[in-house]
Structures are given as structure tokens and as C-alpha cells.
Image (cartoon, rainbow, N blue to C red):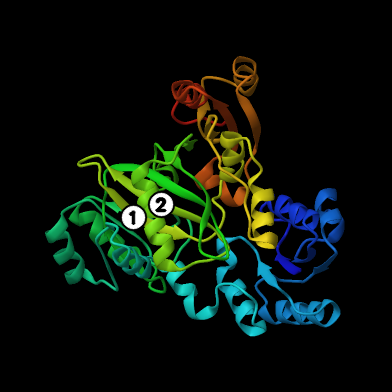
Amino acid sequence: MNFIFFSPNFPKYCTEFCFHLKNCGVNVLGIGDADYNDLNEKLKNSLTEYIKINRLENYDEVLRTVGYYTHKYGKIDRFESLNEHWLDLDARIRTDFNIFGTKLDFISNLKQKSKMEKFFNKSEVESIRSITKFHRVKAKKFIEKIGYPVVVKPNQGVGANMTYKLASESELEHFLHTKPSEVEFIMQEFIDGVLLTYDGLVNKDGEIVFAASHEFPHSIMDTVNSGNHFSYYGLKEVSKEIEESGRRIIRTYGIKESFFHLEFFKSNADGNIIALEVNMRPPGTWMTDAINFTYDIDIYKLWANMIVNNQVEGPFAGKYYTGFASKKNHLTYAHEHEEIMQRYHHEIVKHDSITDVQSQSRGNYAYQFRSKDFDKVKQITAYIHAVENRIKVFS
């Protein structure tokens, strides 16, 4: 199997995917913008060949490189970045070279939130009421129907960038006057609830071969807009209601041989499960590692085995609750790194800085920890996030 991995050096966990592909006998061919000598040794040893191009966004460069690999190694069986940022490019290359996977004619269904809502409806899973291509009059009529607050975000976007909660007419007017004209926004009703995910693997036959779930006590939107820290929990079990809703959506989409990361709200008002978003990629922010620590498995190895053999061994049982808690540089915390490590050295399984591109939403430094006791995981999160003063004063 000839597998082109696009941008194999970023995010960091791509190394693990390449490593396990190679161990499954795959010819792993890399395309990236980093110098070969800057790649880590494990990644170097996992790649049959690596070609550096000047700009990953330059489609002609990518096209020529894929053409070169095709001429040298034969038909390309897979082209993947496993990165939401490159979904369009991935689909375009697959279309131009007739490579297995999502093509251009379907990719908008995985990127535009308004189109996701249509699939949720087909799945008979409750979704958030919304409008697109709205102006002042249309927006006010929508708000008259559902009430404030509402959430506005790019109809096609990644993460919580340019996502705002509007709680009054003055905030609506400010948004309408200041929003970028080139960006299409979607307006959604605000759901007071807990964010839950459905994450896993679906094989080439459309069968879900692994699934996990995570809980987010704070929204990413609030983390970005308020400058607050960020956390989530890896759960030992997938709730029946999330499992049922997630399976319906995956079946309706018809996606095959892919990671999936679906987001839902569980309403605080009535407990209903409400579909928010679908992503056909690995979950970010160390969540693949959270899956490993929760289940005591190697999700990267499982994925590679699914790609090559269409198999994933199982069944799998969650053994721990895993927590993720980050710090932001502008906040003054009650407990320094050394205190945290000394107090919870048995529970902490990973800690590291976060890349600048993700730091606004995810924090600057993060800890990952696990325990069989969910309350203990929450206790560690609270300890890491305890602050002395809200804002750090620089002299």
C-alpha cells in the first residue's frame, strides 16, 4: 500500500500514525514544508521518502509531488493529513488522482455547519435551530422566535475562532456592524448544557469498530473569548444516548475508513441530546492520548490496522477517567508546576507546552492525568486551575 501522509510533522501525533503504518507494511510517503533534518528520528524512520515543498497551500506544488510519487511508486492508495485544516486539499487530491476516500463533491457536508444540520435531521437526531445568510431583519425575526442569547460563528470554520454569544440587541448591532463581510456566519440558538463527544473509528464497511466519549465542563467559545483556562474529561463509558445518536449520524453520512469526532450538547433543561457538529478526523487537544490512557490501548496502532487490514481487535473497556487541564500565561495560579507534579505524580501521565497556534483556545501548558475515581480527576483539575489573581501583572 502506498500512503501519502500530508504534513506528517504537524500536529506532533502524526508521527505515531506514520510509525504504525510502516509497522503494518505500508509504504509511507511524506509531503511537508519542514526541512527533513528537522523531523524527529521516529518520523524519519517511518517514512520511505519525504519531499519538502515551499508552501503547503500551493496546490500546484502538491499536485506535482503526488505525480512524482505516482510515477516512482505506482498508484497511490491513500492521501491523508488527518487535519481539519487540509480537508479541502485532501479531497481535491483524491479527486484528481482517483484515490479512495472523501472527494470534492462531498467535502462541504463535512465543513459547513448548515449542511451538517441537514444530516442530523435525516438521522432523526435533534439539532440546534439556526439560520444562515442572515441580515438584521432576518436575525431579529429568528431571535423573536427563540430568544436571547444566540451564538454566531462562521458557517465553515475550525474551533471557536470568531464565535460569539450575543445576549442583547446592542450586542447584535455591534456584531452586524463589525463582522467581516467576506465570512458567511451562521446564527444558532444557545444551548445551556454539557458538551459531550462521540469519538472513534469506522471501518471500510461502515462499521464502528471503536468508540469513546469525552465531557467538556466549559465551552471552547468561553475559553477563547474570556481568556480562561481549558479542561475536559475522558469517560470510561459511552452513554447509551450518545452511542445511539452517534451511530445514527455516522450511518446517515455513510463515511467509511475514518476517524470521527462528533459533538453534542446534553441540555441542562430537559436532558435531551442535541447534535452540534461532525468532524471526520481524530479529535484534537491530546484526546487521542486521552483515549489511550482511558482504555490502556494504542489508538494509533488500531487506526493503522484498520487502514491496512480493515480490522480492529476488541472489545474494549474503559479502565480510567482521564483529565486534561491547561494553564494560560496571563493568569496567576495558586500552584506552581513543581507543586502539581509532587502532589499528583502518581496520576499525571503527560505534561507539555501547547503549540502557539492552539494556545488561545487550549492554553499554554497542559497536564494529562488519570484515575479510576472520577471525583479524583475533577479534584486534580480544580487544583491545577486554582488562581490567586485573575490577571497577572507584568512589571
Q: Is residue 207 found left or right of 182 in the rendered image?
A: right
Q: Which mark is residue 275?
A: 1
Among the two numbered marks 1 and 2 on one chain, the one whose residue lies closer to the N terminus? 2
Q: Position of residue 295 (x, y in %)?
A: 58, 36
Given residues 191 and 259, the one toward you in this image is: 259
Q: Tell me the quarter of the image containing the N terminus.
A: bottom right
Residue 125's x, y, as percent? Answer: 30, 58
Which residue is more in the foreground, 46 or 84?
A: 46
Looking at the picture, tell me which residue is in the foreground, 254 or 13.
Answer: 254
Q: Position of residue 73 (x, y in %)?
A: 83, 76
68 to the left or right of 109: right
Q: Is residue 162 visible?
A: no
For the residue carrying disc 1, how many other residues have a C-alpha within 10 Å: few (<14), some (14-19), or many (20+)?
Answer: many
Query: Which secondary structure, mark 1?
Result: strand
Q: Label 2 crowding class (10 Å Cα cut-off): few <14, some 14-19, many 20+?
A: many
Q: Is residue 247 above or below residue 365?
A: below
At label 2, the amino acid type is: Glu
Q: Residue at horizontal 71%, vertical 76%? A: 62
Write down the residue under mark 2: 263
